[in-house]
Amino acid sequence: MTPTPRILVTGGAGFVGRHLLTALKADGRWGEIHATHRPTSGPISSIDGVYWHEADLLDEAVPDALIDRIKPSQIIHTAWVTDHGTFWNDPANTRWIDASLKLANAFIRKGGKRFVNLGSVAEYEWQNGRMIEGITPEQPATPYGAAKLAFHRALMEQGKRGNVSTATARVFFVYGPFEKPGRLVPTACSAIIKGQPAAFGSLSQWRDFLHVTDLARGIVALTGSHLEGAVNIGSGGPIRLSLLLDMLEKLGGRSDVFQRGARKDPENDPPILFADGAKLAQTGWLPLVGYEEGLASALDHWRYRLT
């Protein structure tokens, strides 16, 4: 008799994690769903059938103890430093490499079967426009991207040595309910709802935005597949940032709060970035949430939060 799959999601209380837990539950293939949250996470969303564990993975003793207690057959590792505006250069990125390696080592020693890591478009060199796994150079421009890539490579090696299936979901630009304040879409939503001006750059760049529920479904599809190595999860169809904000203005019924061109664009900011999605498409996954529907859900979320 095949053992019931027992999956552990680290960072379950985060922006991606909470949507991922809902997607895993809806998928129905996982007998037990376990999730970690930091001691400082605050109130945890109640999701029927999810077992929560308070855990600081940066504590050296925690990864071994956590794996000993849960004994998962699969892990989706989403926990990392994510504080907006600082995570790109945060020294904690190095600590997260070590903590993640300890988690992977404990998982392999205890007989785990599949480890899926949440990676980033930041692991790539950004001057190529279209990011293709195994073809686009892996040349991160930030400590965050370098740390993510270092763990990805170490995880692949550990998986080979330990006979464990491993994959890294390379995430592009995500938006939707529970996104952290300060990012593009929450900033725009807040400006519309409060009627207060918000300054933006040229908004001339094209980026691959994906609604967080589609991302969650993509991670579930990857986890349940036999795909290994780096796997892009993006829409595959970039949108100009100015058009994204045009759509939000129309949905919010305001056209007087966005100060376009009031800020300088970052130096060396590439004109276009988007995912080649052919590898993940092998699972049958496709994005389902269109921009208008997705932006409306984000606007509704922030209207609820701010009014």
Image: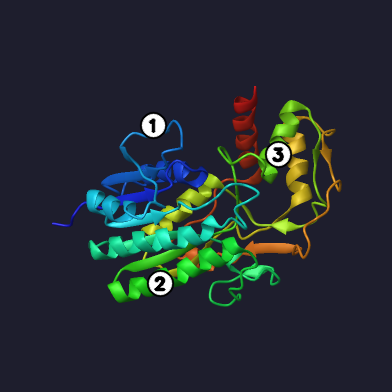
Relative to 293, residue 160 above or below: below
For residue 145, what is the image quadrant? Answer: bottom right
Dot 2: element: helix
Q: Is residue 89 left or right of residue 46?
A: right
Q: Is residue 284 visible?
A: no
Q: Quadrant of the C terminus?
A: top right
Q: Position of residue 112 (x, y in %)?
A: 27, 61
Q: Are marks 1 and 3 in contact (CB under 8 Å)?
A: no
Alpha-carbon neighbours of circle 2 within 10 Å: few (<14), some, or many (≥20)? many
**How far apart are the alpha carbons under marks 2 and 3?**
37 Å
Q: Residue at x 75, y 31 (%)?
A: 192
Check disc 3 and report the residue beneath it.
187
Q: Nearer the viewer, residue 223 or 54?
A: 54
Q: Residue at x 68, y 63 (%)?
A: 273
Dot 3: element: helix
Q: Is residue 82 left or right of residue 273?
A: left
Q: Earlier in the sequence, mark 1 or mark 3?
A: 1
Per the rendering, the mark at residue 46 is 1
Q: Position of residue 180 (x, y in %)?
A: 60, 41
**How far apart are the alpha carbons under marks 1 and 2?**
34 Å
Per the rendering, the mark at residue 285 is none
Alpha-carbon neighbours of circle 3 within 10 Å: few (<14), some, or many (≥20)? some
Q: Is residue 199 visible?
A: yes
Check disc 2 and report the residue beneath it.
156
Q: Residue at x 80, y 55 (%)?
A: 265
Q: Quadrant of the N terminus?
A: bottom left
Q: Residue furthest top?
A: 307
For residue 177, what is the image quadrant? Answer: top right
Q: Earlier in the sequence, mark 2 or mark 3?
A: 2
Q: Is residue 305 left or right of residue 263?
A: left
Q: Amino acid at mark 1?
A: Ser
